[in-house]
Image (spheres, grey):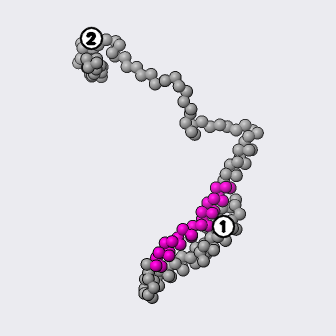
Amino acid sequence: PVAILAQVLVAAHLAFSPGRHETRRAMVSPAMKKWEFNLDCGAKLPSALGSTMHMGDSDGSSVAMKNKKDNIKALQEKKAWEVALGPIKQVGMQLFMLWMSGSSPGIFSVMIMSMLISSSVSQLGQLTTAFEKFDQVETVLQKLVFALTLV
């Protein structure tokens, strides 16, 4: 096995080296020059996801468009609920900041209280702009939850 490996390495070196070794190339057998890789193992692999496109026929295209609109509507409703529940995620941080500011009336506790009140009022003022991108979904309940979590 070592001798065969040495012959293969010499043949590869001679095959890719410039023309000064022409006399030695004649000594290499033709079977050693030919490198062959068979990458086709005969198994049929499934195509990768997204690599093939299926065009819907005329009957199924309306169903596909309806499903796509339903999916977009469901996604917008999910995102609207995420926006509505956004202020709840800030409550823990705000309570921790209030606790860390202490009970004495100092400059930091006044600044933290004013920051919490001003951020709640500004978010309440941006209620309509926060939900205007969800045009395909009725967002009355989400707006109500958003407003109640700010209070």
Task: Check the image and name the residue furthest to the right.
Answer: 59
User: In the displayed structure, would residue 10 be above or below residue 101?
Assistant: above
- Label 1, label 2: how far apart the Cα atoms are: 83 Å
Query: Which region shows up in magenta?
Result: 73-99
Nearer-the-camera pick, 84 or 14: 84
Label 1 CA crowd tier, 10 Å (few <14, some 14–19, many 20+): some
Q: Which residue is under mark 1?
A: 142
Work out whether mark 1 precedes mark 2 in sequence or the reverse, and give the earlier one: 2
**Residue displayed at 44% across by 87% down:** 104
Question: Residue 117 appears at what percent x and percent y?
Answer: 54, 80
In the shown orientation, is residue 94 left or right of residue 72? Answer: left
Which of 36 and 86 lies nearest the eye of the viewer?
86
Kind of residue sitting beneath label 1: Gln
Dot label at residue 31: none
Q: How many numbered circles are shown?
A: 2
- Is 133 situated left or right of 99 in this image? right
* Magenta-colored stretch includes residue 51: no
- Residue at left offset 63%, top offset 74%: 148
> Where the C terminus falls, by quadrant?
bottom right
Q: Position of residue 41 (x, y in %)?
A: 49, 23
Question: Residue 130, located in which quarter of the rendered image?
Answer: bottom right
Which residue is depicted at the point 72% across and 48% down? Answer: 66
Secondary structure, mark 2, is loop
Residue placed under numbered mark 2 in the picture: 27
Of residues 122 and 23, the one nearer the viewer is 122
Q: Which of marks 1 and 2 is in front?
A: 1
Give the quadrant of the N terminus. top left
Q: Quadrant of residue 81?
A: bottom right
From the top left corner, tell me how far across and down residue 84 is, in percent: 61, 67
Binning the other alpha carbons within 10 Å of mark 2 as few (below 14), some (14 to 19) or many (20 upward) gives few
